[in-house]
Every structure is written in C-alpha cells, then in structure tokens.
Image (cartoon, rainbow, N blue to C red):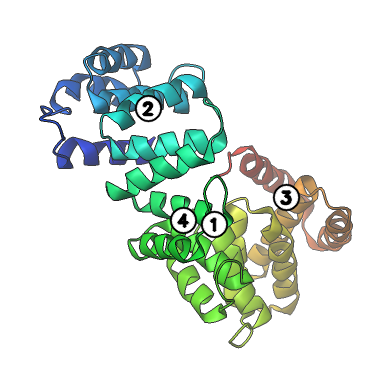
Amino acid sequence: MGLVFVIISVFYNSFVWANNQTDWAAPLHNAQELLANERYEQALTAFKKQAERNNGLAQFNVALFYDLAWGIARNRSLACQWYEKAAKNNMPVAMQALGQCFYDGTGVEKNKKFAYNWFSKAFEQGIADAACQAGELLLVGDGVDIDIINGQRLCLEAAQQGSIFAQSKLAHWYFTGQYFPQDYQQAFNWLQQVASIKSPESAYLLAQFYDQGIGMDVDNKLALYWYEIAAIGKYQQAYLPTALLYWQTFNKAENDNKEQLLAKSYLWTKVLSLSSEEEKEKEIAHTLFAKIMEEIPPTWIENLDEKVNMYLAKPSN
C-alpha cells in the first residue's frame, strides 16, 4: 500500500497530461483521503465517479482496487479493463500494468505481442522497468521476433536508469551466461546495486560469490549475511546454506555471540524442514536439527517456534 501511495503521489504532483486534459489530481483529493483512511467503499465510489468522467488517474486507481483487493474481492479481469481505460488515456504506469495483463493472460487473453507493445509504450513514457520487460520478450522471441541486440539494449538502458527489475535480470544473465556472455565481474557489479530483501534471488547470487570465492577470496561472514537476506525474502534455495553456515559458525565461535548463532541455527533449520520439498534437503535438515537439539536449551523452543510460525505466515515479497 505504501509503495502505491508513493506512485500515486508522483502522478498527482508531476505530470502534465496530454490532449489538453485538465489537472486529473485535483478532483481526487477527497477520494485519496478516503483511501488513506481505509474507507474503501466510499473511496471506490468517489474514484469511479471521476473515472466515468474520463479521468485517467481515477481509472488507474479503480484498477488498483480490483487488482490489490482494497476492501473488495480481487478481480483481475475488471482490473485489466480499468488499466486499459487508463492506458488509452496516456497513463504510463497503466500501460505497463496492461502489458502485464496481456503477458500473464489473467483478466484478458494472453497475447505476448500486445504485452510487448504496451511495455514499449510505457517505456517511451518513462517507465524504466517496462523497457526490460519488452527487452526480455525480444531476447526470448516470445510473441515477437527474436532480436538479441535490441533486447540487450533495452535491458541495459532500464538498468542504467535504476530499474531493480532490469538490474536483477542482468545480474542473473551475466552470472549464468544466458542472453549475455558469462561475465562474473559484470554480474557482481549489478548484484552489488540490487541485492536486498526486495530482490532475494540477487542476494542469493551475491552470497555465492563470497561462499564459493568467485573472483575473490572466500568470505563466510559476507556469504552468510547475503544468504540470510535472501532467506528473509523467502528465497527457498537460501534456507539450506543459511542454516548450515549458522551452525558451522556456532561451532567455531568462542565468544558471547554463541547464543544468537545457536538460535539462528535452530530458526533456519526449522524453516528449512517445514518448507523444503526436496528429500535430500529434508534429510540434511533432520540430521542438522538433531545436532542442534543437543545444544539448545528447552526453554528457548516455544519462543523460537513462534518466530518460525510468524515468518512462515508472512506473504512472500
């Protein structure tokens, strides 16, 4: 919700609308206030009133109600219909959202060519993420003819403009050698910019540089730090190395930090055992958990299990 309000505030304060449109934000102050106070039914009515007057910003807001289930059941089909109205009213972020509708085929019939066209239009209007979304379709040749050079160019432009989506893609592609020549230094450079809880896959890849000593000395401390960032972001591949490194660090530690290391070993091993669908990982978790239980005070378990359950109940980013 907070991110959406930031996005909306940008549109409220920054855009001059094409086709001699009057200020779309001014009539929406009351609706926005109702939304901020979580008076969803009244807010939706207020936004719809302005949307029916061809207010593109109001149309985008109505789409968000249906897409994000603000006070109502989620209805992707209606969301995409309203995104289309706003997109055709020259609303850049709605163009990107409509492209995603066609890309996913949720709410509308899947059509990658239409997705590419709307992503391209969104980028032309300043939405950096959309450039790499269009670029990836060119790289794959999905719905459009393969065009490696322009696909690479679009994703590089998006990344250089600060798109976390594009930066994450580039890091992965340089790391694996997909669509770009394998280049660990380039991968590392992009990962340093983007790795965070908001990009757990990138955090996991960065951890591997430190864990495996790719182009550098092995650094278990930094590897553990980034594995845990990925794990906090619910990137499941990070659970096993996080649990193992905490346990290894606990066994090597000789300071007052041992209690925290032991608790973290328990937490991530329990998360792994409850989350993994891989038999080999389950076996490792079972063996590791048995060793941890020999060390951990029984009085800790109830509190730690509560933390595990709270973590697992949270939605993924």
Q: Earlier in the sequence, mark 4 or mark 2?
A: 2
Q: Closer to the camera, 72 or 228?
A: 72
Residue 206 at x, y percent in the picture: 57, 70
Residue picked out by circle 2 = 84
Which numbered circle lies on residue 271?
A: 3
Q: Are marks 3 and 1 in contact (CB under 8 Å)?
A: no
Q: Is residue 162 left or right of residue 278?
A: left
Q: Which residue type carries mark 1? A: Ile
Determine whether the residue tagged by mark 2 lies in a helix, strand or loop.
Answer: helix
Neighbor class of circle 3 (other Cα within 10 Å; few <14, some 14-19, many 20+) is many
How far apart marks 4 and 1 lie (CA) works out to 10 Å
Determine whether the residue tagged by mark 1 lies in a helix, strand or loop.
Answer: loop
Neighbor class of circle 4 (other Cα within 10 Å; few <14, some 14-19, many 20+) is many
Neighbor class of circle 1 (other Cα within 10 Å; few <14, some 14-19, many 20+) is some
How far apart marks 3 and 1 lie (CA) works out to 41 Å
Residue picked out by circle 4 = 135
- Determine the residue positioned at 83% across, 57% down: 281
Residue 84 at x, y percent in the picture: 37, 27
